Image (cartoon, helix red, strand yellow):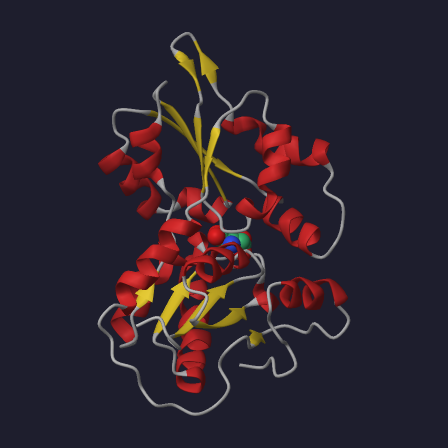
Amino acid sequence: MTDAARILVFDSGLGGLSVVRALREIAPEAELAYAADNAAFPYGDWEETALVERMCEIIGNLIDKMQPDVVVIACNTASTIGLATLRERFDVPFVGTVPAIKPAANLTKSGHISVLATPGTVNREYTKALIDTYAFHCHVKLHGAENLAEMAEAKLSGKEVDLDALRAEVVPVFVEDENGRTDVVVLGCTHYPLLLEELEQGAPWPVTFIDPAPAIARQVLRVLEGRTQLDRGGKFANRALLTGDVDNDAGIVSALSQYGFDISDKNP
Ligand code: DGL
């Protein structure tokens, strides 16, 4: 059931648009709404308990109001800490986004993989457990970038990316020793695929950057499979819902409208 399925995509900011891009490609007939907790962006350095409570409240309200068929937590920082609690508290199916460590471990030839994520995601037990389970045989470099998500937001708002600043943020993920060098970098934050071109330009040597969005989009379709369509009223398709003020931020408005979203009724 993707025909008129209601898919709610949630992120702290605009990073979830990388997942929207993949969803629009494989399910053009589905109805997408986009919710961003931009009042609390970035999630990267939030305290864990406070963040989970905040997310549950916001997402609970969104579920009541929007009645989605599935909620995509298009944020690694939120999924690695909150997914289990969200699933416990709400009946709607959730698809999360967690660092693509398993595919990276399968893909590497050198055995050196890196995870580029927010400081929150690299510190999570969830991320460490993924490494212990799927990449125990690899050298794994975890790096929490302080400002990369903000750089992606600035790019989406039409600002030019400062390549030197971007290089400084990502250089720790490129590791070289006598046994080889990093050949696969996991983009462990949904904002980062939006900077793929600049990441490729800034890389000291070519690597494969893994953007998990196409795999997330496929998982959404699997979850929707076999679900019966409900007859619901209200506008869903292309609504953008935001927790923060955007009245003076023409950049966010234009970024969302480039992806087909309308913020005229933005309060969840
Ligand atoms: N897009 C979010 C993620 O995937 C993070 C950005 C933030 O720090 O809020 O982790």
Position of residue 92 measured from the top left corner of the image (x, y, whole percent): 30, 75
Position of residue 63 measured from the top left corner of the image (x, y, whole percent): 40, 80
Query: Can residue 163 be seen in the rendering of this structure?
Result: yes
Of residue 119 and residue 263, the one placed in the foreground of this image is 263
Count of marks overlaid on the render:
0
Which residue corresponds to the image point at 52% horizontal and 71% vertical from the top-left? 35
Is residue 201 placed above or below 267 in the rendered structure? above
Query: Can residue 45 be seen in the rendering of this structure?
Result: no
Is residue 95 placed above or below 34 in the rendered structure? above
Of residue 120 and residue 29, the one placed in the foreground of this image is 29
Position of residue 198 measured from the top left corner of the image (x, y, whole percent): 64, 37
Left or right of residue 29, residue 163 in this image: right
Picture quarter containing residue 130? top left
Q: Quadrant of the N terminus?
A: bottom left
Which residue corresponds to the image point at 55% horizontal and 50% vertical from the top-left? 191
Is residue 57 placed above or below 181 in the rendered structure? below
Position of residue 65 measured from the top left corner of the image (x, y, whole percent): 45, 86
Left or right of residue 234, residue 97 in this image: left
Of residue 156 and residue 258, the one placed in the foreground of this image is 258
Which residue corresponds to the image point at 76% horizontal and 50% vertical from the top-left? 159
Picture quarter containing residue 238? bottom right
In the picture as drawn, the residue positioned furthest to the top comes out as: 178
Which residue corresponds to the image point at 52% horizontal and 54% vertical from the top-left? 18
